Image (spheres, rainbow, N blue to C red):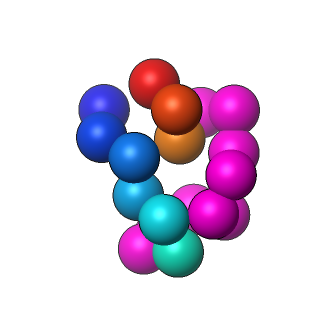
Amino acid sequence: MTITTGSRYAPQKPHSAC
């Protein structure tokens, strides 16, 4: 998973930094 900043999830979520 790539880091989606403000795309779909919050700018800094634990799942975003997959």
- In the rendered view, tell whether residue 11 sits above or below residue 13: below
The part of the image, by quadrant, that contains residue 2 is top left
- On whether residue 13 falls in the magenta region, the answer is yes
Q: Could you tell me which quadrant the N terminus lies in?
A: top left
Residue at left offset 39%, top offset 46%: 3
Q: Residue furthest left?
A: 2
Q: x and y percent of residue 5 in the render?
A: 48, 65
Q: How many marks?
A: 0
Q: x and y percent of residue 7 in the render?
A: 42, 74
Residue at left offset 53%, top offset 74%: 6
Q: Residue furthest top?
A: 18
Main secondary structure along the magenta-highlighted residues: loop
- On whether residue 14 falls in the magenta region, the answer is yes
Q: Which residues are magenta?
A: 7-15
- In the rendered view, tell whether residue 2 sits above or below residue 5: above
Q: x and y percent of residue 8 in the render?
A: 47, 69
Q: Residue furthest bottom?
A: 6
- In the rendered view, tell whether residue 7 sits above or below residue 3: below
Q: Could you tell me which quadrant the C terminus lies in?
A: top left
Residue at left offset 68%, top offset 52%: 12
